[in-house]
Amino acid sequence: MTHSERKKFSAEREEARESYRASVAAGEPLSGAKLGAEFGRSERWGRDRIKEVKTEEDRRTQFALASRNPGLSATALLMERGEIDANGNLKGVATNDTAASGASGRTEAASDLAAVKPEPAAEVDDRQVPAQPRGAAAVAWLALVLGIGASVAANVLHTWTVLADGSGSLPQVLGSAFWPVALVVSIETMARVRWPASIGYSLIRFGAVGAVALVAAVVSYRHMSGLLAYWGEDPISATLGPIAVDGLVTVGALALLAIHKARKEA
């Protein structure tokens, strides 16, 4: 990730934190899902920004408490905060030796207070965000474009040279290019659209849209297989060759989707 990208992501995170603070001030705190959606990000991304705001507020509260009571001891401050009882014992810690636990509680309380100091808002180090290797998107686009180009060309050539014997009409030839394009659009629709989690939408996603993708793949396959056979390729090549072409289209489309999701999680 480049320096400019890190600055961009940091600015976006700060804008998201400000948006959440504004929603809290308005009395309608945003949820992680709504905050993420506002910036085109995931629910997890939104929850992380909310957590950063709350962490910053907790630290400011602790520092303000210590600043207002400079004359109090560590134990007194933590008693005021309700973290230890009147005997100096840490609340919620069971013990049989009151004196020993009281001393231990005061020691831990003093350590806790010493750690209280003003700090800036928690910030995720952009350098630790997993980034795609350089050129990953270019390779994915190359696979997609190469696959679509080869598939469209094969479908058109088969229609023109084999089915129409070199005299096919323009609509007939252009129509043959529909199938590989329909395959790509179907894959993108199934993968990129955020479908609601219900049985009905699952049937639409994998049933209806999946059926369109399957039909488009079969018709495109037959065009390419017929063209390879017409060119004199052996049966194995004519059978497996089209799978490599349409498979390249599928791999390229899904790789771009994976890269897109990784960038949204960054």
Image: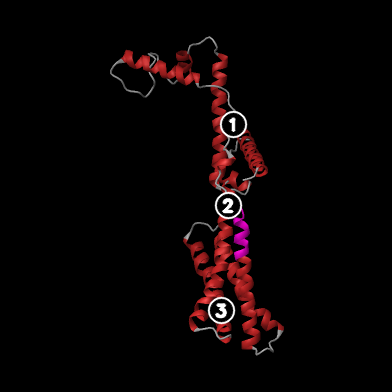
Q: Residues within 10 Å of mark 1 (few under 14, many from 20)?
A: some
Quick one: SS at disc 3?
Answer: helix
- Dot 1 and dot 2 residues touching (CB under 8 Å): no
Q: CA distance from mark 2 to mark 3?
A: 36 Å
Q: How far apart, in angstroms, are the residues tagged by discs 1 and 2?
A: 30 Å
Tell me which numbered mark, 2 or 3, is placed earlier along the sequence: 2
Question: Residue 11, percent across and down?
Answer: 66, 39
The amino acid type found where label 1 is placed reads: Ala
Query: In the picture, which quadrant includes the N terminus?
Result: top right
Q: Nearer the viewer, mark 2 or mark 3?
A: 2
- In percent of width and height, residue 78 lies at 46, 18
Mark toward the start of the polypeptide (1 vs 2): 1
- For disc 2, the marked residue is 133
- Nearer to the camera, 98 or 129: 129
Circle nearer the N terminus (1, 3): 1
Residue to which mark 3 is pinned:
219
Query: Callout 3 environment at 10 Å: few (<14), some (14 to 19), or many (20+)?
Result: some
Q: Is residue 81 above or below residue 147?
A: above
Which residue is at 39% across, 22% downward?
91
| Tag 1 near tag 3, CB within 8 Å | no
For residue 179, above or below residue 120: below
Whole-percent x and y of residue 155? 62, 79
Q: In the image, which residues are magenta?
A: 134-143
Q: Residue drawn at (50%, 18%), measured in percent from left and top?
A: 114
User: Eyeballing the image, is 234 above or below 248?
Assistant: below
Q: Quadrant of residue 8?
A: top right
Circle 2 sits in a helix, a strand or a loop, which is it? loop
Q: Amino acid at mark 2?
A: Pro
